[in-house]
Each structure stands twice: as C-alpha cells, then as structure tokens.
Amino acid sequence: MEGNQSFNLIWLVLGFPLFGFLIQSLLGKRIEKAFGRRVAGFLAVIPIVAAFGVAVLLTKQLAGMDATQRAEVGVVQTLFSWIKIASINIPFEVRIDTLSMTMVLIITGIGSLIHLYATGYMAEEKDYTRFFTYLNLFIAAMLILVLGNNLALLFIGWEGVGVCSYLLIGFWYKDLANSRAANKAFIVNRIGDVGLTVGMFLLVVLLAGNKDKLGIDGASGRWLSYDVMLPHLGELLKGNPGMTTAIALCLFVGACGKSAQFPLYLWLPDAMAGPTPVSALIHAATMVTSGIVLLNRMNIVFQMSPVASAIVCIVGAFTALFAALIAFGQTDIKKVLAYSTVSQLGFMFMACGAGAYWVGMFHVTTHAFFKALLFLGSGAVIHAMAHNQDMRNYGKLFKYIPITAVTMFIGYFAIAGIPGLSGFFSKEAILGYALANDHAQISGVNFSYIVGWVGLGVAMLTAFYMTRMTLLTFNGKTEQWRSIEPHHHDEHDHAHDDHGHHDHAHHAHEDHGPDEHGFFYTDEELAAQPHEHEHHHDLDKNHTPHEVPVSMWVPLVVLGVLSAGGGYVLANNHLFEHWLYPNGLSVLKELEEHPHHLPGGLSLMAYSIIAAGLGIVFGAIIYFRGLPKKEGWDESKWSPFRRAARDQFGYDNAMVSASVDGGRDLATFSWRGLDATVIDGAVNGSGWLATGIGKVLGWLQNGFIRAYAAGMLLGGVAILGYLAYALFTGVKK
Amino acid sequence: MQAYLGILALVGLAAVICAVMVTLSWVLGPKKVTPYKSSTYECGVAPVGDSRERFPIKFYLVAILFILFDIEVVFLWSWMTVFKHSSMEFMRTSFISFLIYMSTFILGYLYVIRVNAFDWDETTSLEPAKLGEAVQES
Amino acid sequence: MFNFPAPTIDWVIIAPTMIVSITGLLALCLEMIWPKRDNTWIIGVSLVGLIMAAVSVVAQFSYPEATTFSDTVIRDRFALVMQLLLIVAAFCSLLFSESYLRDKRISYGEFYPIILWSLVGGMVMVTTRNMLLMFLGIEILSIALYVLAGLSRSESKSEESALKYFLLGSFASGFLLYGVALLYGATGSLDISAIASAWPRADLMHQTLLVFGFGMVFVGLGFKSAFVPFHQWTPDVYQGAPTNVSAFMAAGSKIGALAALWRFLEGAEGMKAIWMPALTVVAILTMTAGNLAALVQKDAKRVLGYSSISHAGYILVGILAHFAAPDKVGFGSLAYYLLSYTLMTVGAFAVVSLGANKGKEGTKFEELRGLWRRSPFAVACLIVFVASLIGIPLTSGFAGKFMIFGDALKANLTVLAIALAINSILSVAYYLQMIKAMFVDDVEGDEVIEKRPVSLGMTTVCALCAGGIVAAFIFTPVVIEFLVGKS
C-alpha cells in the first residue's frame, strides 16, 4: 500500500488549510489593509473549499476500491520519518479509509460553509484575520486528527484542536468571562487528555511486550501504525482482559473530555462564549465528534471489553438525559443548543457502547448537518437581534428573517426526529441497536437495553426543549424586545450580547465573588478592563431585525437541504453502514439492528414517532403563544425544577468550588507545608552553594588581561604537564 | 652539546662584564644632581611642554598603511624571483594568482583614499540617514 | 632552477569561500561609491552573497569527497556542513545588524565586508587539514573580529573588549603556532593526517614533540572555543563588543574553532589514551564554571557569554563521545547541536540587542526591564531561545543536548553524561533571571515604555531562529539526515 501514487493528493487536503493558516497569520493583516476584508476572508475560505474539492475526488477514488479494502485496510501515505527511536518508528503518515474520509468530508465540507458564513458574521470584527488564522489552523489540526495513521498523530491533532478551541473561545480575550471560559475549556480538556495519554501508553506497553509474538513486523518498527497494529490487536487483547478494560476506559476518558460527556462536559456550554461560527464549527460539528472518531478507530478495544462498553453506554445515556434536562432551564439560545449538543453526543456514545460504531458515526454525520445548521441559524438570529442572545427578548421573528426561520425549522425537525429528516434515521438506529443487543454488560445486567429506553425518553425531551427554543424565537404573540425598558435592560446586561457572560456561569462565579481567587486578574486590572463591546448598538424597543447577508444564509440553505435529505440518502440500503463496516465488526459480528419484541407490541419506529410527537405537542401547547409568565425575567417565579436546571443542578457550581477552592487549599498546603520548608530549603541551599562558587569565579574574572593571560598560561602548563606525565608514565597507545 | 659550550661561556662572560661595569660606575661614580642635569635631554634645546604629549592618531594610521603596502613589495620580490625561473604553466597560474592578490591590494588602496585616511583635516561622523534619523531638509 | 608544479584548482570546492570573499569586496566597493550613506544596498548584496554561498555549499552535498590546491583544501561532508553552519551564523547576525548599529550610532558600512571576510576565515579553517592554512584561517577570522569588537569607538567598553581580545588572541595564536611548529618538526608535514601516521612509529622524542605540539594546539583552539581555563576573555569581550559582533563571535568563531579541533583530534586519535582524561576534565570544568559564574551576572550579554562557555563544554562532550567510540557516534549530534546553538545564541543576542538605544548598550538586567512591552514579538521569541538554551523539550536545544547525552552514554563517558545533566539543571536559574528582567520586573517610577517599532530584519531573524529551533526539534531525524547524509 505504501506510496500509492493516486492518493498523493491527500497532502493537498492537509496542505491547503495549513497554507491558508500561514497566509492568514503572516500576511493576513497586510492583505486586509491592501485589498480589504473581503479578499482576506476569501483567501481563508478558498483553501478549505479547495481541500473539500480534493477530498471529494479522493473519496470518489476510494469508493472505486474494493469494499473490504477501502474500509478495513485503507491506503497509507507516508510523508517523512518522524520519530525514530530504537525499535519504534512513527512516520508522519496518513490513513485514507472510509472512516477518515467521512470525517474529512464533514470537516472540510461543513468547515467551508462555516468559513463562508463567518466572512459575513465577523465582518465588523477588528481582528478579522486573527479569527481566520485560528479557524484555518483548527481545520488543519482536525484533519491531522482524523487522517493520522497512528495514535501519536491523532494526539497531535487532538491537542491542536484543543489549542485552537482555546484560542477561539477566548477570541474576545479582553472580556474576562471569555478568558475564563477558554481557560475552563482548556483545563477540563487536559483531564481528558490525561486519560488519552495514559491509554496510549498502556497500548504501547501492551504492544511493545508482545510485538514479536504476534508477528507484527518489527523490522520496520511501524508497529504503532493502525494498519500494522489493529489487525493484531484483537488477538492480543483477548489474553489481557484487565488491560483491555483499562485501555478502553482510559481512551474513553479522553473521548469524554473532547466530546463533552458527563463528568467533563462542563466546558462546552461555557465555550459558547466564542463567536457563533466557532460554536457551530468546533463545538457542534467537528471537534466534539473526535471522541466518537477515537472510539470508532479503536473499536476493537471496546468490542473486547463489555464492561467498558457498558460504562460508555451508561455515561452516554446519563449525559443525554442530564443535558436535556438542563436545556429546559436555559434562556440563552446558544446555551440551549450547547446542551442539546452535549445530549446528542450522549446518544452517539450510547450507540458506540452498544457496539454499533457505524451508527455513532452516522449520528455524527447527521448531527453535523443539523447542529451546524441550528448554530448558524442561531447566529443569524443573534446577528439580527443586535447580538442579544436571550430568548426572552425574541418572539415573532418569523416575518423578519424568513430564510433563517425556515432553515432553522428544518434543523429543529431533524433533531426532534420527525420521520424522513436526517435526525430520525440516525436516532432510530441508535435506539434500535441499544434495545436489540446485549454487548454492554456488567455482571449479567444488560445495560444497553436499559439505556435504549432512557434514550427514547430523552428523544422526547429533545423534541420538547427544541420546540421551546424554536417557538420562543420565531413564534409567540408579542415581539418581546418591544417591551424592553432602559432600566430593565441594564439589569440584565450580562445576558446581553454574544461576547457577554452567560447567566448561570455568571451565577456560579458570583457565589465566589468577582474572582476572589485572583485567578485571572488583580482587582486593579479588573477595574481597568476596557469595555470592549460598547461598539455594538444595543437592542432596544425600536429595533427592527433584518435578514442576514447572502454569505450567511447560503450556508444555512445548503445545510438545510443536507439536514433534510442527508439521513435518508445515507440510511438507504445500509449505504453508510456498508461504507464504514462492510463486513460488520471483527468480534461482534451478530449485531441485531432492530429489537424483536418491545412491550406494547409496537415497533420501535412507532415508539420513536410517538416520542417525537409527544415532545413537539407538549412543547407547542406550552410555548405556542410565546413566553409563559412563569419563565419570564423574574427568575424567582420559576419553578424549582427550572431553576435547578438553570444552575445545572448545582453540578457546575460544585465542580468549580471543589476544584478552585480545593485546589487552592491543596496548593496552600503544598506551598506552606512542602515547598516553603522542604523544597525551598534544599533548593536555596544548593542555590547558595552555586552562587557562592559563582562569586569566587567572578572574583577570578577581575578584568585584567595579565590575570587572564596568566590563567591561560597556567592552564596550558597544567594540560601540557598532564600530557607529559601521561606520556612518560606510559598511559599510552 | 659540547660544541656549544664555548658560545654559552662567551655569552655568560659578556653578560657578567656588562653587569659589572654598569654596577661599578653606578656605585662608584659621584652623584651631583642639578636641575639642569635632571631635565630632559632634547638635542641641546630647552624642553617645551610635557613629554607625554598627545599627537594625532593619523601618524599611526599612516605608519600602519605604510607597513601594509610595504609588505606587498616583499611578496612581490620573492614571487618575482621564483617566477622568472619557472615553467610556463606555473608562470601562468602564479601570474594570475598574483594579479588577484595585487588587485585586492589596489582595492584596499582605493578604499584608503576614498575614506580620506590620508586627509588630515577630515572630521569623521556619520550621515543622519545611517543613524535611522529622519533627514531634515533645510 | 625552480620547478614548482602548478597546482590544480578545483573552483567548485572553493566556490563558497570565493563567493563570500567577492561579496565582501563588492560590499566594500559599494561603501566606497557612496560612503557614509544608507547601508541598504550593502546589506542586500551581503545577504544575497551569503545565500549564494549557502546554495553552493548545499549543492556540493551530493559531490564526492575531493581535494584541491595540492591537497590543502578539502571537500567532505564535515567541511560542507561546517561551512553551511558558519554561513547561517553570519546570515542571522547580519540580519539584525543594521537596526542595532543605528541604535548604537555606529552604522559603518565597513561592518559588512569585515564580517564577511571574517566568515571567509572561518570557512578556510573548516575546509582544510593543512595546519598552516588553518592558522591562516584563524587569523583572518580573528583579526576581522578584533576590528569589529572595537567598532563602537566612543565606548570604552568596546575598546577594552577589542584590545583584550586582540592581546589574548595573539597570545593564544602564539600557542597554536608553536604547536604547529612542533608538529611540523615531528612529522615533517603540515598535513594533520601526517600526525596519525607518524604517531605509531615515533620514538620517545618524537612522541614528546607530537604530544606537546598537540597540547599547544589545543590551548590555542581552546582559547577560541572558550574552554576553561582559557575562557576568561569571553564574558568581557562579549559584553564590550557590539552585540551583533558578539553574536557572530559566539556562533561563527566557535564553529570554526571546534571544527578545527575536530580535525586535530582526528589526527591525534592515536594518542587518545593520553589526552582523553585531560580533555574530559576540561569539558567538566568548562560546563560547570560557565554555569556557576553565570549565576551572579547582572548583564544579559555577560550571561550569554558564560552560557556560550558552558555550551562549548556540552559540545566538547559530544566531540569526546565521538572520539571515544568513533564507530558508534558520528558527527551528526555535533552538527545538529552546532546548528541549534547558532540559532539560539544568535537569536538571543539579537533580542538582547534591542536594549540598545541612542548610542548606549543597555543590556544590564535593570536596563532591560519591561522590554516585553517595548517589543513583544521579539521578547516572546526570546522565550524560545532561552528554552532552547536551557534544553526544554519542543526546542532543538533539548534534542541536541539529549543526543549528546545519549552519545556520551553510548561511548561509556558516564561521568561526562552526569556532569552534563547536572549542568543543564544549574543553567535554568540564570536564564530565567534574564526572562524575568524582561517580563516580570517593571520599570519603576514615571518612565513610560513606548512600543518601539522593531526593524524588519530583527523580526525576520527572531522568526527564523525561533521557527528554526522548533522545526529542528520536530524534524530532528530529517535535519540530521540533511546534515550528515543518509547513513
């Protein structure tokens, strides 16, 4: 497979975004100055579109290959030898197979749409080219993540997207809240990364110990590459069940971090602080799916470990449920979408846990369509509403921004699971596999079955809260912003704009006072913070929303079409399944696709439709007439459940205090108790010693040439003397 | 070693005789210090000013330049000696080599003239343009 | 009467040297045509010349080994690589020179030809095994540097530096020349390889001559490479000389001297048992003394001076590792380390040179305070350089040190390996002081820090060096393969 000429073009796919990144970072400002924004933005979009074009060509070519060959073996292209130590050889190589190309298409395809959208959305931004610099770099890193032919390259991409996401969340870095959100995302992701690295190391240990036994070609040393490692891994893991579960769980922790699953989902909602295109690209369509990609890539490990699979299922289902509940308490339109993303990611993990890896990818794909659509749509709404994100200020927007509204409705129906739209197919498949199979077991309990029913419930909740969001925005009786009073507006200043703070995160921090730990800024610096977003005109009662520019609604329409039809096309004739896993899985060959007996004698499809329908109907009943009184501005009138949901049931709060306060206590202890006495003592002691000697040497360094010359002479004499001594005492030859 | 002993003895003897003569005259000679005697001897003329007088570095510069170009002649001579008795091939090569050598010297000489190293009244300072300051046209 | 054979001349081999010399002449002509005017053209010509020279070096990588000028000039991979490194050092030093020299009010156009000719000296040194030619190279290199060190004539520090360097350098040259004479006396040849063949069949007297000759040569070269105890000039001279000159001195002069030392050690490999212990002690002393003395310095350039001493020690470890086990350890680590050393040292000096203002040097720690605000990009790059000098991963300094460490272990020089590791830790402190001065300590009182525009050359050199350091780390095997060829 080495050096298959016809796939050389893959380097272009990687190279274009990198090239775009270089152009933007090195010349962006100049281009912007010389030729204007449009050209600079255009230059950022072109590489991604070009990469997409090349990716389409390559995918076509790949589709022409034998089904087993293209999915299970793939094509490996090596660029150069990267790490070469002893018997390990990790070349910089990419693997072109159905999984990686699917992701490449999603990344570059959705990526180019979002780039296009961003040229419009960010048009008034000061740091225009910085934004596209990060965005292009992100695409490049994400491509490395999915294309890399070994875990080391995956890790580079993994960290690369982490950094880019950090940079983009904190894009408006002068705003304290954004910096905090960025820090949070970065730190929480680090926890996941620890898992991933440990998993990788365990895997290396396992492979290194057994590579001769399994006949992995040791000579070339490429035993960490997927194409060498994966075919043998199953056999190897069979003998080490404990190790298998450990590796699986470690990898899963990594996946949890990137894909925002329960203990580590914290960062994703806060990440909405970034510009909306970023939310769409990174936090909905691409980066958060890297956990699923990892699970798919390493599926053999999870196939070999029912326990780990069960945990994946449970965590996925719990996250789906938990996030769906939280979504009810959100009033910020992007927050609702953020939690729905977390929830949908939970669905994907449920599928992977149940052993239906292709379904996970399937949902990744459809979700990429409709969630990117919803986010971009919400961006359009926010754009139209003078950067106000609170849904309580919306209402009756349909007539002002019809294109956005129609496309958003398509996305809403897709995620709610209306039959025929893309979300329906993938979600139904997830539930079907979960209910029908018993792979995910811990001591005989079939968790995947339980999880399937939970999923069904969550599907209903999803339809419900998405109805709430959509109707509050586009329907209702009144145009809520007409009733904004000046003083009223001030009170809710924090919910006011795209860069602003989010309600509950704000509350969570307020409990600690304004940055009492001095984590980020000193008080003086805080006071001196310039109020950056003053240049936005505020939303007031005389505001008239306008439809967004062409560059912004074209992506919406394209995504709308994909969200509507994508699911059917891919599900038809098992197209997607056969594309990814033509021969089924290596271990769990006998996966059932549909459950045979469900209580009540109804088929799963009926159940799904009922769930979606119930959700929509309930939602419509409550919200069709607009904002209910008891969900209004006065949050003390909210129901206890809603208030709890708003505060993420106290989870975020608890985590923040535990980590910040606990961390501070630990740090204080290690500072006072350990560092100041034990370590400082040792360090200072040796420091004094070293400095003392340094002083003596400094004294020798008195600046007189005669002294230096004498030193040289003495040194020379000493050396010559020693040489003579050595020669004459016969230490020779 | 034996053969050189005589020379060594001669050197030693000469040194001893010199030392003895100087020391004896210093010890035995009468010392009468008068202001006139202890003043600086300057060819019979009464001394003017301090002997540690500063004089223009140009003297030094010209001396150095003289030495540089003087060396050239030394090389020229030895090269010539070999040149005229050599094979044609060697003549050609060495002539070209020497031509290159001479031309660098001439370049150096031009440089010396150009930067006014022989010009006694020159004041050295840099153009403002070189110091990164805006040149003010007045 | 005289029947000297006419030497055959292979112009390709000496092409790089020729290109650089002629570039220097051209630059001088430009200065003569428009004396005391803008230096832009001179710089342009010099940089283009250097690039051409570099190309002509790289182009020869695929050529077979050869000699010319009656075996005095040689072309092998080592010579080519060292030439390339020298050119890189000069190129980077030239890039930031103009803005610095302007800030120091010493923007003489002659600077450029002189530094080019200094480079020629270095290139001559590394392309020969002939001791006399090597001496000639050293002198060309050094005399040019003596002049450059005193370039800032109005500063007594600079004058002192030039004089100090000149006097001690002449002293060292004396050693070197004496050593060469002894070696010539023992072998009857000026070629270094004659030492290797003469040693096994030498009687005690000739052996004495050879050993003493070698020892003298080592003293001479040790001075240029700044080994302890011949190092004391280094901080004084680096501090006094204009910063761009210090940069070239630290990188170029050292590469030349170490390459020459390598050649001499090749010749003297037969008497390894005799010199190895002495050189081991020198290496340990050099690393340690450099680092310890740096701890109490208050001037960034002095710190870099001491740091260059300790780095010379690290490099000597690499060299010794090769000669202790020649079949296991090649010159890959040495070449790689020298490359990374060049980039980080020149880069660091470049950033430190930003302290210069209105004819003043301004490199004391307290004068560097708040430099971060004045030129954020450059100082950010300094972090990369310092990380590399310390040897923190993600920089080539780490990879280089790691390889030398590995080489030392491979060659069973455990003591040296341990000394190297300990010294790496020691060095962290004083580098951090430098960073601290620029970042953390703020200007006291009412002094306002203005963001001064940084010249394009400075930005380029920072970006080049920092980028090079990181890239060289990431592509370590690729870089080594480029330098030493496929093994």
Image (tube, helix red, strand yellow):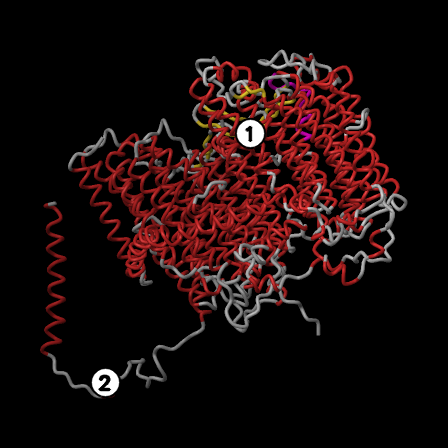
Q: Quadrant of the N terminus of chain A?
A: top right
Rendered image: mark on residue C230: none
Residue ID at (73%, 20%): A604
Residue at the disc numbered 2: B37
Image quarter of residue A361: top right
* Residue A93 horizontal/vertical position (percent): 59, 26
| Above or below, A439 relative to C202 | above
The answer to whether residue A326 is left or right of residue A697 is right
In three-dimensional space, the C-alpha distance between marks 1 and 2, rounded to whole angstroms, equals 104 Å
Q: Nearer the viewer, residue A503 or A530?
A: A503
Q: Residue flagged by tag 1: what amino acid is it?
A: Phe
Q: From what the image shows, is residue A290 above or below residue A705? A: above
Secondary element at tag 2: helix
- In the picture of the structure, the residue carrying the numbered disc 1 is A252
Magenta stretch, residue numbers: A1-13
Nearest the viewer among C142 and A112 is: A112
Q: Position of residue A587 (x, y in %)?
A: 57, 13
Where residue A117 sits: x, y (%)? 78, 41
Q: Secondary structure at mark 1?
A: helix
In the image, residue A6 lies in the stretch drawn in magenta: yes
Amino acid type at circle 2 is Lys
Chain identifier of the residue bearing label 1 in the image: A
Q: Is residue A554 left or right of residue C197?
A: right
Tell whether B64 sits left or right of A283: left
- The x and y percentages for residue A399 are 90, 44
Residue C422: image quadrant is top left
Letter of the chain that mark 2 sits on in the rendering: B
Q: Residues within 10 Å of mark 2 (few under 14, many from 20)?
A: few
